[in-house]
Amino acid sequence: MTILIVGASGATGRHLVNHLLERGHHVKAVVRTPNNLPDFLKNRERLTIIEASILDLANEEMARHVSDCDAVASCLGHNMTMKGIYGQPRKLVTEATSRLCNAVKANNPQHVTRFVLMNTTGNRNRDLQEPISFAQKCVIGLLRLLLPPHVDNEHAADYLRISIGQTDHMIEWAAVRPDGLVDEDEVTKYDIHPSPIRSAIFNAGKISRINVAHFMADLITDDKLWEKWKGQMPVIYNQESNPKM
Ligand SMILES: NC(=O)c1ccc[n+]([C@@H]2O[C@H](COP(=O)([O-])OP(=O)(O)OC[C@H]3O[C@@H](n4cnc5c(N)ncnc54)[C@H](OP(=O)(O)O)[C@@H]3O)[C@@H](O)[C@H]2O)c1
């Protein structure tokens, strides 16, 4: 397969690039600067680096980049600096998601393209009954007011859920929702659920970025897994962080 990845230089994106290369796939990584790529991604076979800030690409350029791709994945996130959180582009993830989907459609592909979005357990899947406590509702309301990246994550998933929906002929999607992200060097056991099994605000679990990337790579490359999770927002936790069920 050929997969285009945005946010490829990020702490999760770099693992996704690596997992896919190790499985023998071709990866096109969009990065603002190759200097932000780790050493383990330098001079790799089957890796094409596209040096660009994703939203600066013209529509035609984007369409050209995705034209030979079987899947597109986003591990974009706002840098945790004042400029990253409160500066422009405030709708980084949403705009990248919608423009990449438009780029896929502009090519009128004869096959379905998979779109995998890295999202968050702080966001609810409104297609499902996902009740949260009054206290959590209040905190999420505050996050919406105070943290533009949270709203961006919500809108990006809403774009896939509502604008692409469940019956699109060109794009199928999944929005992966990690709980509290941590860094680990090795893939460990993890659990996937259709909805959160603990409070993202008051009792967050852990998930390592390398595991999130592993699951995203599985979704992209494993047809059976894709059939199970397409059109959904699977939640991922490290196995050890969950109470025994
Ligand atoms: N922190 C948590 O516990 C948590 C939990 C659940 C979900 N999440 C979500 O997970 C996602 C990714 O997390 P992460 O830790 O892997 O992210 P990260 O390491 O901060 O990576 C972010 C990526 O986005 C790129 N980026 C940032 N601003 C950009 C811009 N203006 N234009 C183009 N590219 C830009 C970065 O590129 P550069 O290398 O060029 O900066 C980098 O590749 C985020 O959406 C976050 O909200 C976080």
Image: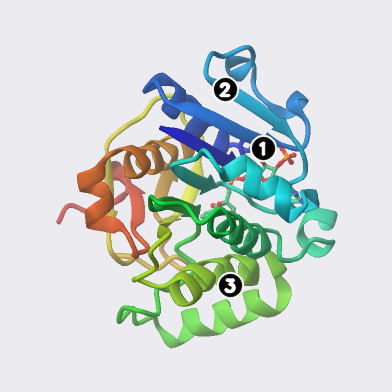
In this rendering, position of residue 49 left or right of residue 81:
left
Query: Judging from the image, what secondary structure is the residue with disc 2 in?
Result: strand
Q: At numbered mark 1, what does the secondary structure look like: helix, strand or loop?
A: strand
| Residue depicted at 34% across the width and 50% down the height | 237
Report if the beta carbon of the residue with label 2 is closer than 8 angstroms to ligand 1: no
Where is residue 79? Give x, y as percent: 73, 49
Any atom of ligand 1 within 8 Å of the CB at mark 1?
yes
Q: Nearer the viewer, mark 2 or mark 3?
A: 2
Residue under the image location 31 percent in, 78 percent down: 128
In this orientation, which residue lies closer to the viewer: 162 or 120? 162
What's the residue type where badge 3 is placed? His
Q: Nearer the viewer, mark 1 or mark 3?
A: 1
Q: Mark 1 points at which residue?
A: 30
* Residue in view at x 30 percent, y 82 percent: 129
- Residue occupied by mark 2: 47
The amino acid type found where label 2 is placed reads: Leu
Quadrant in the rendering for residue 219? top left
Q: Which amino acid does the dot numbered 1 rest on?
A: Val
Crowding near pointer 3: few (<14 within 10 Å), some, many (20+)? some
What is the x, y in percent for residue 217?
39, 37
Residue 190 at x, y percent in the picture: 29, 42
Residue 78: give its label: none
Callout 3: SS: helix
> Where is 1 relative to 155, above or below?
above
Q: Which mark, by number, is residue 155? A: 3
Q: Earlier in the sequence, mark 1 or mark 3?
A: 1
Left or right? Give the position of 141 relative to 193: right
Q: Distance between the residues labelled 2 and 1?
A: 11 Å
